[in-house]
Image (cartoon, rainbow, N blue to C red):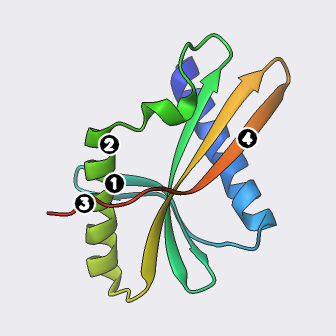
Amino acid sequence: MNKGHELGRKGEELAVGHLRSLGYEILEVNWFSHHLEIDIIAKDGNELVIVEVKARGTDSYEHPSEAVSNKKIRFLVNAAEAYIQEKDINLDTRFDVISIIFYGKGFEIEHFKDAFYPPIG
């Protein structure tokens, strides 16, 4: 496994632990449907939460959350719509981003609730 995939996997594990500590119910981790993928799908009360996890080492120049481009947002919205239809879910949906920066043996985690809203149109 290359270093990027390893950081991503470890980041997702930490993000799941973080969400559970906040009382979220984890529904799916690495949900796939055809070419669509969502890192974490959770419930926070009566909200469906679609979570994108971005992990980086300290050698990266950009903050992990900056890697969520407009193209990635469209991809996540399409994936969320597919998941909602597949599971026949009728809940308000929000999109969160969890960024994790690894340094030495430690890490820093940031959770951005309502990180973006689906584009209209």
- Could you tell me the amino acid type at mark 4? Ile
Mark before the other along the chain sequence, 4 or 2: 2
Residue 80 percent location from the top left of the image: 34, 65
Residue drawn at x 32%, y 42% as measured from the top left: 72
Residue with the mark numbered 2? 72
Q: Is residue 36 visible?
A: no
Mark before the other along the chain sequence, 2 or 3: 2
Do the residues under discs 1 and 3 have CB atoms within 8 angstroms? yes
Real-space CA distance between mark 4 and mark 3, rounded to the nearest whole angstrom:
26 Å
Residue drawn at x 74%, y 66% as measured from the top left: 20
Mark before the other along the chain sequence, 4 or 3: 3
- Could you tell me the amino acid type at mark 1? Leu
Residue with the mark numbered 3? 78
| The quarter of the displayed image where residue 118 is located | bottom left
Do the residues under discs 4 and 2 have CB atoms within 8 angstroms? no
Residue 18 percent location from the top left of the image: 75, 56
Q: In this view, does 55 lie above or below 17?
A: above
Q: Can residue 112 be seen in this view?
A: yes
Classify mark 3: helix, strand or loop: helix
Residue with the mark numbered 1? 76
Classify mark 4: helix, strand or loop: strand
Real-space CA distance between mark 2 and mark 3, rounded to the nearest whole angstrom:
10 Å
Real-space CA distance between mark 1 and mark 2, rounded to the nearest whole angstrom:
6 Å
Do the residues under discs 1 and 2 have CB atoms within 8 angstroms? yes
Residue with the mark numbered 4? 109
- Could you tell me the amino acid type at mark 2? Lys
Mark before the other along the chain sequence, 1 or 4: 1
Classify mark 2: helix, strand or loop: helix
Classify mark 1: helix, strand or loop: helix
Residue 83 percent location from the top left of the image: 33, 71
Residue 87 percent location from the top left of the image: 35, 82
Crowd around label 1: few <14 · some 14–19 · many ≥20 (10 Å): many
